[in-house]
Structure formats: structure tokens, C-alpha cells
Amino acid sequence: MKLTKSIILLLKNELRNKQAMIFSIILPLVILFLTGTTNKSNIPYEYPGIVGIAFGVMGIVGISSQLVKYINNGVLKRIQITDDSLSKFYIVDYIVQIFFMILQFIIITLCTKIFYNPSYNITKRYLPLILFVFLLTMTLFISLGILVAAFSRNSRDASTVSNVIMMIMLFIGNALFPLNNFPKILMKICKYLPMNLYTEIMHHFLNNDLTNSFIINHIIYLLLWNIFCMITGIILLNIKIKNH
């Protein structure tokens, strides 16, 4: 019951932050429509990347700024020294952010279908694993946001660092631009970036070119990224809150 109330309160708080909500939803749609206007034939390839960008904006950019603000105004410190544990706060925050990411996914998918109606050839037997990939990608970007917050002094620092990360993912994360034209060394490095792991799975899935070994290998890397970012981010953020 307390957890449900906490989720509702955090949802209300997020909805009050209209600027962040609009930015996280509008930016991916702007990219979608600009891409469609420039070259409609690119939409089938770029759709998964646009969804990934939406997740990144909500998770990395939004979470990092939110947490730094909560640290600086003493909210997390008060939670830490009261009966309400930070662990419960993190669980609630993950749930709330995933809710908004699902909302982003629905809006982007509907707009893509209505305005461009791309043609895909998918295999339904992989759908459960694809849903798991979505969950891993969402939680990973939230964890990256927590990690950014742990190293940021204020909202401006958090915004700067998170936007740099998003720009890197945008250009070398296989989101909007194929990696085929990159140097081989860079391609090998980019192959293991979170955004690229997600987009590669989605490109293969949407083109009915997915194999068991391919998706399992990519899921393992996403899991490793999740474990590292989540544990490291939460530990460092707890230390920062304690010392603030």
C-alpha cells in the first residue's frame, strides 16, 4: 500500500514537470518527422533508434537532473535518515520512469504507423525476448541516469553530461546512422555500447533476421551493463547523499 502511494506521488511530481515531459516526448517525434520529411524510406531503419533516443532522454537526461535536484534540496537526505529507505525510492523511481517510457513507445509507434506505415517482417516467437530487451534497455538508461547524477554537482552538470552521452549514442549507437562507414576499430568499440546492443536486436527482429545465439549474446551484454551501472550508480549516489 505504501509503495503504491509512493508511486502515485512520484507520478504526480513527474507530471508537474511539464517541460521535461514535453521535451522527452516531443524531441523523438521531431526527429521522426524530420527524418520522414527528408527521406521516408529511412523510417523502417530509424524507428528503433528513435524509440531508443526517447528512452535515453527520459532515463539518462531526465533521471540525472531529477536526482541532482532532489539531492540539492535535501529530499533524498531526508528519505535516507527516516524510516523510508532509499531502496524503496529507487524501486518507485524505476517503476515510474518505465511507465513513462512505455507511454513514449506507444506514442512514437502510433505516429510511425499512422504517418509512415513502415513494413516489417517479424517472428512472433521472439516477442517475449524482445519485451525483455525493452525492459533491460529502459532500466539500463535509468541506471545510467543515476550514475550521471552521482558525479554531478548540480542540474546544469547533469544536463551537460547526459546530453553528451545522448549525442554519442545518437551518432555512434546505430540509432540513426549505420556503423558500416565507420573505421573498423571504432565499429568494434561501438558494437558493445548500450544503444547499439538494443538497436541491433531490433533491426534484426523487425527484418526477421534474428537468431537465438545473436539475441542471447546481446541480452547478456545488456544484463552486464545493467548490473554494473545499477550497482555502481546506486552505491555512489548513496555515498553522495550521505556526505551532502
Image: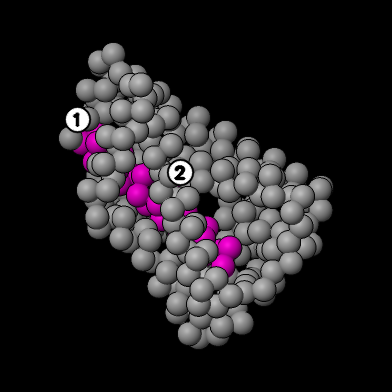
Q: Are marks 1 and 2 in contact (CB under 8 Å)?
A: no
Is disc 2 placed on a helix, strand or loop? helix
Is disc 1 placed on a helix, strand or loop? loop
Q: Position of residue 63 (x, y in %)?
A: 36, 44
Which residue is painted at 36% across and 25% down in the image?
3
Kindly identify the amino acid type of the residue bearing the numbered disc 2: Ile
Q: How is the image coloured?
A: one colour
Left or right for 52, reference 122: left
Q: Position of residue 216 (x, y in %)?
A: 75, 44
* Observer able to see residue 56: no
Q: Residues within 10 Å of mark 1 (few under 14, many from 20)?
A: some
Q: Main secondary structure of the magenta part?
A: helix
Q: Is residue 191 above or below residue 63?
A: below
Which residue is painted at 62% across and 59% down in the image?
199
Which residue position holds label 1?
A: 74
Q: CA distance from mark 1 to mark 2?
A: 25 Å
Q: Is residue 142 above or below residue 192?
A: above
Asked if residue 55 is among those painted magenta in the image, a careful observer would answer yes
Q: Is residue 36 above or below residue 172?
A: below
Which residue appears farthest toward the top when viewing the image? 83
Q: Position of residue 223 (x, y in %)?
A: 63, 38
> Depth check: 87 or 146 in front?
87
Q: Quadrant of residue 149?
A: top left
Residue span colored magenta: 47-72
Q: Residue 98 bears which disc, if any?
A: 2
Q: Position of residue 75 (x, y in %)?
A: 22, 30
Which residue is painted at 20% across and 36% down in the image?
72
Q: Quadrant of residue 185?
A: bottom right
Q: Between disc 1 and disc 2, whose residue precedes?
A: 1
* Observer able to see residue 75: yes
Quarter holding the C terminus? top left
